[in-house]
Each structure stands twice: as structure tokens, then as C-alpha cells.
Image (cartoon, rainbow, N blue to C red):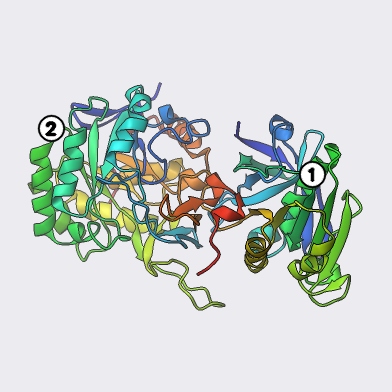
Amino acid sequence: MRLFKDSVVLVNQMEAEDIYRLEFPFPEISEIVAPGQFVNLYFPGRPQLFPRPFSVAGVRGENIVILYKNIGCLTAEMNRWQPGQAIRVLGPLGNCFTIQGEHHVILAGGVGLAPLLFLNSRLASLNQPCHLFIGARTVAQLPATNAITGEIFTATDDGSYGFHGNVVECFRQKLDTMSRPFSVYACGPDAMLAALWRMSLEQGFDLQLSLEKIMACGLGICQGCAIKHARENEHPLRLICQDGPVFNAKELDFNG
Amino acid sequence: MVDLRTELRPDFILRNPLLTASGTYGYGYEIADLVDPELFGGIVTKSLSLNPRVGNPPPRIAETPSGMLNSIGLANVGVDQFIARQEELLSGYSGKVIVNIAGRREEEYAQVIRKLEEKKWIAAFEINVSCPNVNEGGIEFGKDPLILGRLVRKLRDATDKFLIVKLSPNVTDIRILATAAQKNGADALSMINTVYGAAIDIRTRKPKLNTVIGGLSGPAIRPIAIAYILKTVKAVDIPIIGIGGISNGADVIEFLLAGARAVQIGTANFFNPGAVVEILEFLTKFCLENKIICLQDLIGRAEV
């Protein structure tokens, strides 16, 4: 069940440099939304037409939580929203992560942490332990990790905190210490996901990736968010909004 | 009570002037849970070709000021799958089902029509001769009046249904194409399809669409559509269905005043799933406030 409705901002606060947490009531979906799914926010009357998709980062009672990074004019506008601001939302959209096996590894790059925070809390409620590798450009851009359950490794591009380098390299250094078989769940910049995708092929671990691409509708109608599919002879393209945003690495082809 | 009906021909009356624009509402029921098809006067399906088409490689869309650039490339399931999957749902639709048809060759258009001609639940065909995003069978049918005229004549001979020709704005004088379509048996024209457009990412220096140039839709093109309709209504006698960036009820009134007898809602289906509800409320309120009993009395009443 998905729903288009009016809601209202309850919380809009900074989590890290340029990264904010937005919370709004959406009781109709709070019990059914699953980690990996996303919601659309609408911005009527702007020159920027498309709704903006955001992964659900968690549920608090009847409220939905999202994380956003201040990167453009609409996120800048979101940044100015005060509690009480009326908003229009649609969701839940897309598919979700499939929790499989007993050993779970989460890899997050930047604001890609959002769907994985939700997954982490779901794993915690199932008493399933996990390892988390969280990467950011700098320590200032690392969100607080006190609500996360599990063993956390952090990486910063500039070395200002934790491992000096990207989160995939950080993970590679710990690979031998992980109990196998493990499942990896990841979200982050395309370059990070591509590197992790290659590693999953070399190392043979199960990998689910949450992808993002510009979308005009989020509903499978505009067909704009197509990506190349690994098994081209079946059907060469998939839609991120409808067939994803979560894909198994085996379905994807990051080459070329 | 306000009468929202609009007549394209005495035997082709829409319960209200709102249609979906091809490619923005799937085949009719994919987003029916969010945008009720029964609110529209009719549904125009995504373009159908004889065989399934995958469409163009990504990237396929970009956002521009008040606009959307797309180069989807007529991705569709093909006419046979369309019938197999959609016939039951669409047979129960109480508005007009208008099937949009694309082809690479004249014969492909005719073959699609022949497969659909006997379907009673289809009220009309809309012929896509104006897709800017495919190498063959798109806009070249819509640029040359002789080629367009020959295609329309062939399809006129193939169908007894209401036949709409969707025109491209990417021509020197749209009236020449409009006249050619009318002369060869079109029952109505829909206009405008997307306008050629392109955008470049300044960091990667790459075009934002895989095909480099695509089609621009959205409020950015609305004044172009209004201008083309104002010109074309004087050149033809057949009804015009207005398309181009309609986002609210005021836009619908503007198209009617310009001379359109119905309109299509396209990109707005993406950026506001509540658009059709809001438009219908506005139309009723506008008519009541202005003491207009029949909405269609406004058609062509712009004082130009």
C-alpha cells in the first residue's frame, strides 16, 4: 500500500555537516515500511519539477525519519523548514533489503547511511548482530553513531577520524576477520558501490546495493531511472524506482 | 451544476476535457491507486509499437527550469502484451480509452491498428508522428506534409475509430502538417509533443541525455503550445487537443480559451499526483464564479 498525503515536519535537525534528519508523521505506513524503501517529497510551484526521493532512515512510532544532504536548491529549502511546515509525501515506494544469513555487514558512504540505519535497527530488533563500515569525507560529515547497534568501523577520506581512506578499503582490511558466509548491504556514491561490486565478484560474498538516480515520478511510469542489467539477454534495463532501489550485485553491471 | 463535458464530434463526447498524455500514465492502471483514472475524461496510453521496445540507454531524463527533458525512446511492451495484460482492466473503464501508436514504418502503424480495431473498449487512436527520440519512425513522419498525409490516409483506411494525430512543434510551420493531417482524414489533432532540448553537465562536460538531444516537456513549453494552438485553430476545422505543461486548472482554461477542445495532462502526473483532483475542483469553481454553465462555451473565446 502506498499513499500520497499531506504531512507536517516535526523534527528537522543537523546530524553532521550538511546532513540533516527530517521527521514527519505518516502513521498509515509506519508499520509496513521496510528498510530499503523510499518516500517522495513534493515541492509544488518550483522551477524544479521532480519530486525528490529519500530512503527511509527509520521509524519512530507513527513517524518516518529521513536523512538528507544539503546539496541543491530543494535540499536548501528543506533546510529552512521549521517544525510545523506542511509537506506532501508519497510512499512507501520501491523494494527492500532481504535479510539473509546470520552474519551481516553494512557499508555506508556519506548520506547513503540512511536506508542502512533503518536496516540496522531492524537487524537489532531481530537480535541479529552486524558489523558496520561507515565512511565520510571528513570527521565533521560523520553522523553520530550512538543509535547504531553492532561493531562500527569508520573511515574518512582525509584521515581525520578512523581509517584513512575509503570505506571499501577499510572493509577489505577486515575481510579476513569476518565470519563467513556473510551478507553485505550497502548504499553510497556510485564509485564506492562499483568498487564494492567488483570486490563481491572477486570474493564471492552476497551483496545488496541500494541505488539512486534522478527520477521524475518514482512510480515506474516515466521510465527515466533505467539502469543496465547484468543479464542483458533477458531484459537489458531495470527501473531503480520499481525494480529497486535495492538490487542484488548479481543483477547489476558496473562495467562500462 | 457545471457541465464539464466537451464535444470533439457529436459522437465523441468527453465527460470532462482532461486526458492523460501518452507516456505519463502508463497503460491506464499502474498508478490507479494514486491517480484515479475515472477522474479523467479519457486515458491516452503509452505509445505502442508492434513489437516490444526496450527504449534508449540511460541517462534518459533530466530536470530543467520548469521542464523535463526525456529520451525514453518509446519503451513499451508491444501491442500483443498490451492486449494480454490490459484488456480486462481497460474494458471496465468508463471514460474513453485512447491508444497511442508508434511505428518505424507506415505498415507497422497499420499492423498495430489492425490488431486493435475490433476492440470495442478502444474509443480512439492517437498517432505518434512526433517522437524526437527514436532514429526511425518518430518525427520524420511528422515533418514532411506528404509523408504525414500518406500515413494518415493509410491509417484512415484501416480504422473506423476516432483518429487523432499528435503533432510535433519541431517544424517550421505546424499549420502545414495540421492541414495535411486534416485533408487525409484525421478526426482531431493533439499538440504539442515535446520540444527539442538538450542540457550539458558542466562538471563532466557530458550531455545529460544519452541521445544528447531529447524532448522538453513541462510548464517551460506551455507558451509554445498556446502559440501553436492559436495559429492552428485558424487553419483547420477539426478539433485540437491541447498539450504542453498543463499543471493546474488555470492552465486548462487558458488552453480552452486558445481553442483546444480538450487537453492532456502529462508531466504534471509526475510532479503532482493530486493534479487532476485539483484541476477538476478549479474548473467547477471557476465556472461557478464566472457564471459559466457549460465549460465548453469557453473554447476559442480568447480575445485575440
Mark 2 sits on what residue? B160
Asked if residue A251 lies left or right of residue A236, the reply is right
Whether tag 2 and tag 1 are in contact, CB under 8 A, the answer is no
Q: Label 1 lies in what chain? A: A
Mark 1 sits on what residue? A102
**Quarter of image, res B264:** top left
Q: How many marks?
A: 2
Q: Is residue A160 above or below residue B71?
A: below
Q: Amino acid at mark 1?
A: Glu
Residue B268 drawn at (x, y percent): 47, 46
Q: Secondary structure at mark 1?
A: loop
Residue positioned 47% across, 30% down in the render: B36
Asked if residue A227 lies left or right of residue B126, the reply is right
Q: Is residue A228 above or below residue B41?
A: below
Viewer-closest of A83 and B301: A83
Residue positioned 69% across, 30% down in the render: A28
Q: Amino acid at mark 2?
A: Asp
Viewer-closest of A23 and B92: B92
Q: Are marks 2 and 1 on the same chain?
A: no
Residue A206 drawn at (x, y percent): 67, 52
Viewer-closest of B290 and B228: B228
Q: Label 2 lies in what chain? A: B
2 vs 1, front mark: 1
Q: Secondary structure at mark 2?
A: loop
Viewer-closest of A174 and A119: A174
Residue B130 drawn at (x, y percent): 26, 55
Q: Residues within 10 Å of mark 2 (few under 14, many from 20)?
A: few
Task: Say which quadrant the N terminus of chain B sits in.
Answer: top left
Q: Is residue B211 above or below residue A227?
A: below
The residues tagged by marks 2 and 1 sit, at their Cα atoms, a distance apart of 63 Å
